[in-house]
Image (spheres, rainbow, N blue to C red):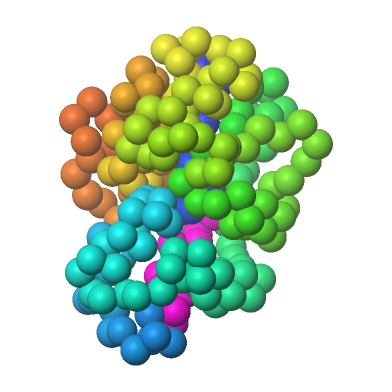
Amino acid sequence: MTPKAVFWDMDGTLVDSEPLHEAALIAALHSVGIAAPTNLHERVLGIAAWPVYEMLRDEFGLDLPFDDWIVRKYDHYLPMAETLKPRPGAIEIYNELRALGVAQAVVSNSDRLVVDANLRMVGLFYPGMKTISRNDVREGKPHAEPFLRAAWLVGVDPADAVAVDDSVTGATAGLAAGMRTIFWPEAPMEGPPGALIINSADELRAELGL
């Protein structure tokens, strides 16, 4: 059965932007003389900008103020966003649900600047579209607040909604919000207990009743 609402993570779920975020982080770190750790991708996947900054500051000696750091990172990221591609199958499923009248929202741990830039680049930007960025909530994922705000915005009970996310951080937030949570990682991996793990767009279509 198709759910009443579907709430999508953005980076890595709707758009293939995680490699761009990693490249921007590496470039920004290099610009201040810090070598990126080899496990950077695993450590920052799905994590909002402030906790990433705290990790880089505390463990690797990043000494820029946060506001200066994030400008430097986005100065690297935004030009690369022109090369952004959708995650195969994801936006097609989004548009199919939209045509059926299913309520949807994009729920991201990224800043508003990045949410708007990414969605515009892949053509998923229209009047009335619901999007929640890290700037719109007090607590980002893994806290439930971003997904609960999405449910409030579209007027559905969280129990009647599905959260789709590619990171453990995001899937944890969906579960905390009381939603049926689909964990769709970029590469097969174990998800948080209670999440439904899938590994393809076809599996996602089936789980959404399409």
Q: Is residue 20 magenta?
A: yes
Judged from this view, the residue extending furthest toward the right is 127
**Residue 16 magenta:** yes
For the residue pair 55 and 174, the one nearer the viewer reads as 55
Classify residue 93 by image quadrant.
top right
Image quadrant where residue 30 sits = bottom left
Query: Which residue is located at x 50 percent, y 10 percent?
Result: 157
Q: Which residue appears at 52% of the width and 31% of the height?
A: 7
Would residue 31 be seen by someone viewing this image from the given angle?
yes
Picture residue at 33% right of the left edge, 37% below the top? 142
- Magenta-highlighted stretch: main secondary structure? helix
What span is in magenta? 15-28
Quarter where residue 82 is shown: bottom right
* 81 relative to 12, above or below: below
- The residue under the point 26% across, 76% down is 61
Q: Residue 144 at x, y = what percent?
A: 38, 28
Q: Is residue 207 above or below residue 168?
A: above
In this view of the protein, can residue 171 be seen by the observer?
A: no
Quadrant housing the C terminus: top right
Q: Position of residue 27 (x, y in %)?
A: 44, 82
Along the viewing direction, whichever of 92 and 104 lies nearer the viewer: 104
